[in-house]
């Protein structure tokens, strides 16, 4: 997967690849020429006393060194640009795929893991591309070219390379084999620490309310220690490898000087040739060491690439139709036609054979015990999930056959957990309608019973909103989310338990305002309080995925035992209060 991923996102930048190869090749050739010129200065200049030859050859070496420096800088620049562009495109592809995921896919991976894959994992692959762009040409050229040039200098000492190079390769292979599982464990533990940090930041109020700071700190410390232990283990392996490589290089240098000195003493070779051979064997070993450094990064990058590929290769369960249809009259009618839904791997369906019609311009409420399938049922309308059996139709068209943008344009969804984005009140409202005027925003806030508290906030519409809306109360957050949905002016409003954080008076005022200002829109409401749904045109009572009651409040009191129990339980609680 690693090389497939790299080729897929690096191939479009082939001019940069060519540039890296050309300039890395040029600087490697320059590096290979210098020891030979240095040997000539010693043997033909210093030994013979030819000062002119020393100056001319030295000037040539300086020119070659300057070319080497320039080529190295340009090659590193091209390699960095290649790696950064690849990382940018890979992150964009991951983000695009994750945004297209339904709740099913997001639940399978988990939000913390998806965040890690789009940050840390991409960074590891990006670093490998950058290092490869720097070393992929120079390392093999230095190693292979160094062998050739060393043999040209002195064949008699070449056997030293046949000993030192295999020893280096054995050391590298042994270390890499042990590092692969450690890197796999490292990424999993980074996922875990990301998850714990996300939970603690989101639930900081709950942690403090229950005085769980010490326990949560211990949980975070345990996860952090797991990352540290894995990092130390991999660091120890790396720390072991590089001293071993330096030992081989230093022993090789000593061997060259020892056996080469004997040959110089016997007159079999010249002193300049010995120094050149020493430099070439160092270049060979350096090339092997650079390749080893690159290969150390491959196991971790490979693990990260597999995790990235798992996201990119995951098929989205909620797909746009190849040839979308267009619904006719935009009235807001919703029909559930013998709908059954099961979560993947579940033993029992969440919803069973539900048939229901929501007439345009009416209010339909859904009530039931926790886990009865209320949120799942309304989630089928905007295709947060797709039905397992049956069909959901909007204005006569199956939602699976509609263009998703057309479907979502007809729906104003206020989720069970109201979420606001960091920015201002105005920027959050403009999610509903881009380019909305202040007048339109104040009107939506007034309908949502939010105008009064927004006017009191410093800046009004420009008041700051923290990520998730954590700097406003739960009721204020829900009203702002309702105002955001109102900005769309859709045919269908879906309120998933969106009134639960409101007091009874605000709840009633909000429902009256909705009936008055959006009378022709279809309203689908999930609620827990009977007072919220008492005046609905029809009430659907769910119990363990089955419709056990359908009618008005008065009708259900006489015909539905489950609904009557809910009403009586709430009335008894109110009476005792």
Image (spheres, grey):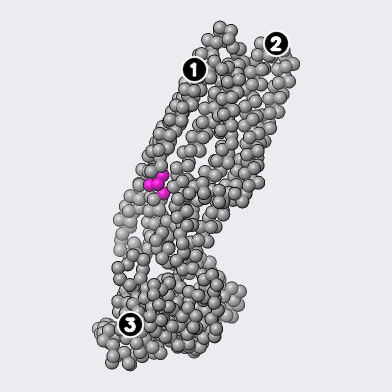
Residue 197 colored magenta? no
Helix, strand or loop at mark 3: strand
Question: Disc 3 or 1, which lies upstream in sequence?
Answer: 1
**Residue 179 in the image: above or below residue 275:** below
Question: Disc 2 or 1, which lies upstream in sequence?
Answer: 2
x 61%, y 20%: residue: 152
Image coordinates of residue 532 in percent, x first then y, are 38, 84
Q: CA distance from mark 3 to mark 2?
A: 105 Å
Q: CA distance from mark 3 to mark 1?
A: 87 Å
Mark 2 — residue? 49
Observer-side mark, 2 or 1, equals 1
Observer-side mark, 3 or 1, equals 3
Tell me: 315 left or right of 210. right
Helix, strand or loop at mark 1: helix
Estimate how packed mark 1 is, as few (under 14), some (14 to 19) or many (20 or more) residues with alpha carbons within 10 Å. some
Mark 1 — residue? 255
Image coordinates of residue 125 in percent, x first then y, are 50, 47
Q: Nearer the viewer, residue 144 or 70?
A: 144
Mark 3 — residue? 547
Image coordinates of residue 174 in percent, x first then y, are 40, 34
Q: Quadrant of the C terminus?
A: bottom left
Question: Disc 3 or 2, which lies upstream in sequence?
Answer: 2
What's the magenta region?
A: 183-187
x 36%, y 86%: residue: 539
x 55%, y 83%: residue: 328
**Residue 303 in the image: above or below residue 351:** above
Residue 571 appears in the picture as rendered: no
x 56%, y 7%: residue: 266
């Amino acid at each position: 997967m690693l090389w497939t991923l790299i080729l897929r996102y690096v191939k479009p930048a082939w001019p940069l690849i060519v540039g890296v190869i050309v300039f890395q090749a040029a600087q490697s050739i320059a590096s290979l020429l210098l020891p030979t010129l240095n040997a000539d200065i010693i043997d033909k200049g210093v030994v013979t006393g030819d000062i002119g030859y020393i100056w001319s050859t030295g000037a040539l070496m300086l020119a070659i060194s300057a070319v080497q420096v320039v080529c190295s800088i340009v090659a590193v620049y091209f390699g960095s640009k290649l790696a950064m562009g690849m990382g940018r495109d890979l992150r964009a592809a991951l983000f695009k795929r994750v945004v297209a995921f339904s709740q099913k896919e997001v639940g399978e991976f988990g939000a913390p893991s998806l965040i890690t894959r789009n940050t840390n994992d991409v960074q590891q692959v990006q670093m490998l591309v950058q290092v490869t762009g720097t070393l992929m040409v120079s390392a093999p050229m230095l190693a292979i070219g160094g062998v050739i040039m060393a043999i040209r200098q002195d064949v008699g000492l070449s056997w030293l390379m046949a000993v030192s190079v295999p020893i280096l390769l054995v050391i590298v292979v042994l270390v890499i084999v042990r590092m692969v599982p450690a890197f796999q464990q490292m990424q999993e533990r980074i996922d875990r620490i990301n998850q714990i940090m996300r939970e603690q930041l989101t639930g900081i109020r709950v942690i403090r309310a229950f005085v769980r700071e010490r326990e949560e700190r211990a949980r975070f410390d345990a996860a952090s220690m797991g990352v540290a232990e894995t990092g130390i283990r991999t660091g120890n392996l790396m720390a072991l490898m590089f001293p071993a490589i330096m030992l081989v290089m230093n022993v090789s240098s000593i061997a060259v000087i020892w056996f080469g000195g004997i040959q110089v003493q016997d007159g079999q070779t010249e002193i300049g040739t010995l120094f050149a051979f020493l430099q070439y064997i160092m270049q060979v070993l350096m090339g092997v060491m650079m390749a080893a450094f690159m290969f150390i990064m491959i196991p971790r990058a490979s693990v990260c690439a597999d995790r990235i590929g798992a996201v990119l290769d995951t098929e989205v369960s909620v797909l746009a139709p190849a040839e979308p249809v267009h619904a006719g009259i935009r009235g807001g009618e919703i029909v559930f036609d013998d709908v059954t839904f099961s979560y993947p791997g579940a033993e029992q369906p969440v919803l069973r054979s539900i048939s229901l019609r929501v007439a345009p311009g009416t209010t339909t409420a859904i009530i039931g015990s926790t886990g009865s399938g209320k949120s799942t049922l309304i989630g089928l309308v905007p295709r947060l999930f797709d039905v397992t059996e049956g069909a959901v139709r909007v204005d006569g068209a199956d939602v699976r056959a509609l263009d998703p943008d057309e479907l979502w344009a007809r729906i104003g969804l206020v989720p069970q957990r109201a979420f606001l984005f960091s920015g201002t009140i105005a920027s959050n409202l403009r999610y509903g309608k881009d380019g909305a005027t202040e007048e339109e925003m104040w009107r939506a806030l007034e309908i949502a019973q939010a105008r009064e508290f927004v006017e009191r906030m410093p800046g009004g519409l420009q008041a700051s909103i923290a990520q998730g809306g954590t700097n406003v109360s739960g009721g204020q957050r829900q009203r702002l989310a309702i105002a955001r949905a109102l900005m769309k002016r859709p045919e269908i409003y879906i309120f998933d338990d969106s009134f639960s954080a409101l007091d009874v008076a605000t709840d009633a005022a909000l429902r009256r305002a909705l009936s008055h200002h959006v009378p022709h829109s279809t309203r689908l409401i999930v609620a827990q309080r009977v007072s919220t749904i008492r005046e609905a045109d029809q009430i659907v009572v769910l119990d363990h995925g089955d419709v056990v009651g359908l009618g008005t409040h008065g009708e259900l009191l006489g015909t539905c035992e489950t609904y009557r129990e809910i009403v009586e339980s709430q009335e008894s609680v109110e009476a005792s209060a």
